[in-house]
Image: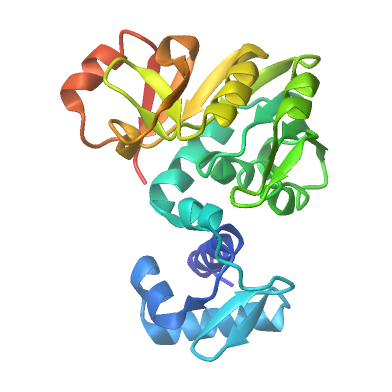
Amino acid sequence: MNRKTQLRQESILSRLRATQREWRVEELAVVLKVGSLTIRRDLAALEASGAILRTHGGCIQAGRAVLETAYHQRVAHNFELKRAIGREAARTIMPGATLLINDGSTTFHLAAHLGDRAPLNVYTNSIAMIGELCRFPRIALYILGGRYQEDGHFLGGQLTERVLENLEFDLVFLGADAINPSGQCLTLDAEVARTTQIMLRRGRRKVLLADHTKIGAPGNAAYGSLTDFDLWITTSGRGGEIRKQFRKMTTIKEVKR
């Protein structure tokens, strides 16, 4: 198998794991910019290896039900932007580090790129990330306890907060639902904001993972500010003027998808 084919098939598997739904041949052909016949050859090879199950006109990940939840829709939204951020974030990690990764849809894409950075100790409250992280044998995975939130596939609440208060991390990676013009980082839920605020305090180095579409997006509960972060990994796009102000608040690394 040549490198180009290998990368394309890895990209197919990445989408299946992230979105937890069926992908049609035509969809894959469009996003991967190849013909339908090429995709069908890839699917035949992946099926032969046991990685996928073929459906009428498409495929699903082997061993998984087709379950498209609100969380997986968020993971799939702006997929290429989030994957580029996750890939860049992984490059900032040194082997042997202890990480905390919260349950965001962008931080999910960091989990998918940690295999080459092992050995690592990774703590998370995300149930959705377990399948990604357990693929890597040299990553010690710790799940923070708490109340299960079905829509977001994460654990939260007072138990999670009490556990966090007794831990410290080399690196904390957090997402945000929105970043307002004042540089505040917001979520859509006050309880999530409280837990995220505690996470922010527990890291020696804090990294924000949020693409450019989060600038000015809806959010009503602030958990911190850009000044609380050592680094913000984002994507190039709108908000050129306001970014000048943001650069006074933290270091910004822009990546291309």
What quarter of the picture does the N terminus occupy?
bottom right
Q: Which percent across, then down, holds residue 175?
A: 50, 32
Is 118 rendered above or below residue 163? below
Tell me what residue is drawn at x 34 percent, y 17 percent: 183
Relative placement, left or right, of 248 versus 7 is left
Q: Residue furthest left?
A: 241
Is 10 rendered above or below residue 202? below
> Can residue 26 be seen in the rendering of this structure?
yes
Tell me what residue is drawn at x 64 percent, y 20 percent: 199
> Can residue 33 be seen in the rendering of this structure?
no
Q: Residue furthest bottom?
A: 56
Q: Which percent across, then down, holds residue 148?
A: 73, 44
Tell me what residue is drawn at x 63 percent, y 24 percent: 195
Is 150 rendered above or below residue 175? below
Frontmost residue, 69 versus 17 = 69
Q: Which percent across, then down, holds residue 132?
A: 69, 51
Q: Which percent across, then down, holds residue 107?
A: 56, 39
Count of numbered marks: 0
Task: State the image quarter where residue 72 is shown.
Answer: bottom right
Relative placement, left or right, of 155 versus 43 is right
Frontmost residue, 2 versus 79 = 79
Relative placement, left or right, of 134 versus 236 is right
Frontmost residue, 59 versus 2 = 59
Tell me what residue is drawn at x 38 percent, y 37 percent: 211
Frontmost residue, 207 versus 183 = 183
Relative placement, left or right, of 130 versus 71 is right
